[in-house]
Image: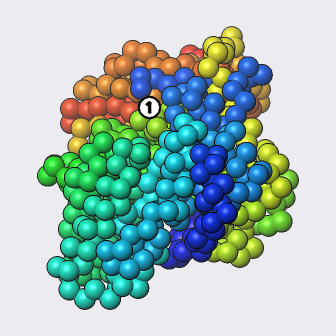
Amino acid sequence: MTSAPHPPRRRRAFTALTATVLTALTATGLAAVVATAPSSTAATTLGSAASSKGKTFGTAVSGNRLSESQYATTLDTEFTGVTAENEMKWDATEPSRNSFNYAAGDAIVNRAQTRGQKVRGHTLVWHSQLPGWVSGVSSGTDLLQAMRNHVSNVAGHYQGKIVYWDVVNEAFEENGSRRQSVFQQRIGNSYIEEAFRAARAADPGAKLCYNDYNTDAVNAKSDAVYNMVRDFQARGVPIDCVGFQTHLIVGQVPSNFQANLQRFASLGLDVNITELDIRMPTPASSGNLQTQASDYRKVVQACVAVSRCTSITVWGITDRYSWVPDTFPGQGAALLFDDNYAKKPAYNAVIEGFGSPTDPPTTPTPTPPVGGCRVTYAMNTWNNGFTTNITITNGGSSAINGWSLVFTLPSGQTITSGWNASYSPSSGQVTARNVGFNGTINANGSVGVGFQATHTGNTGRPSSFTLNGTACTVA
């Protein structure tokens, strides 16, 4: 399941930095992917755990909180990336036409740079948090000029300081149609590509991203984004990245989340998880906190398995300042630190999800699946490639310790990357073997694996599967 559709959202209201805060800030100035089991030698902070896999772990930052000691200390200790929560949005940077104010954004960027934290720019064009004058521009030609001018000035001001820019944010509806924003209504479909072209001209070194919510699963909305990206690539419109906000509900990480990330990465794009939080009914129950931990681990493992998933950003440091309760009454507890900055179970789950860079996988001795096995094989295909999600179920009354799944790929299909198993060879009769953390399949339990492959026109499925030498039922 995917997260519930978001209503048109306005983040927590932006509060200008006081002179005291500004003064304080100035002073402080893939081939097959093998997941490994957590261990005591794993990295001990979110940032270092991500770095062990070559990725960035960031957070959204509110500038007016940086004078709070515990907030600033947690930011500096745990995170290697920073996104300004509100300070780079249109109402903050250009409150009146052609009058720009960068003080609040500069404070965050300069502080991050002194600490070696990467900065994500958020966001150049969005239908929300617009100053009133933008909606008052009645001519489409004039609004296009105003939008180009805004993108050019803001991206140009931060040239060389931003790693990724969320150029356009939330431009699609749930059914895949274009959101009828002021830009869509008055400029038309071309406004998105015009924003990307202006951003590239203003900062050629930044990677340019489209960012949206409820695109975490393969669905009508993510399909629309996927088709837009392919169209941009075909016509030479600059785009380097797609951001997946990943605002989720506890227990509802999409089953095809990783496959969805991978299909965008396979277009030659970076993929980023940009606004991660996982909300639940409040007060939080111990059961929901454990489920939330499992969900965070799944999200991290999906990113680790996709080589071009280069960063994960959580939307806030502490539950105390999360946007969730204001937007979803009765919901909250969505982040890794609670109201008092205590680490929640999800914190350790994130570190475990990245795995230890030093521990090799271990493989138990294989045992036969006494009582039978079942395999489901789901495919998502496109013109010359596909991804699979394979579920292996032990139908017996005793656990399987160590497993290998053998199947034959139809002619013309070749595996290019995989997750949660090792695959050899890449075509013909393939054997998928467990990695260290998923070597045991409990009685009536299941494991999920998958891979990405190319095809030459044949999108057929394997006709049979054997698990440790025993033929399985194909569901």
Residue 108, x across and y down, in percent: 55, 53
Tell me the amino acid under the disc marked 1.
Ser
Question: Which residue is at 66% across, 42% downward?
Answer: 76
Q: Foreground: 371 or 222?
A: 222
- The answer to which quarter of the image holds residue 294 is top right
**Farthest left residue in view:** 235
Image side of residue 128 versus residue 365, left or right: left
Question: Which residue is at 41% across, 85% downward?
Answer: 132
Whether residue 430 is visible to the viewer of this picture, yes or no, is: yes
Q: Foreground: 276 or 127?
A: 127
Q: Which residue is mark 1?
A: 307
**How many marks do you count on the picture?**
1
Q: Foreground: 275 or 283?
A: 275
- The answer to which quarter of the image holds residue 264 is top left
Image side of residue 2 versus residue 385, left or right: right
Residue 299, x across and y down, in percent: 58, 44
Residue 91, x across and y down, in percent: 45, 74
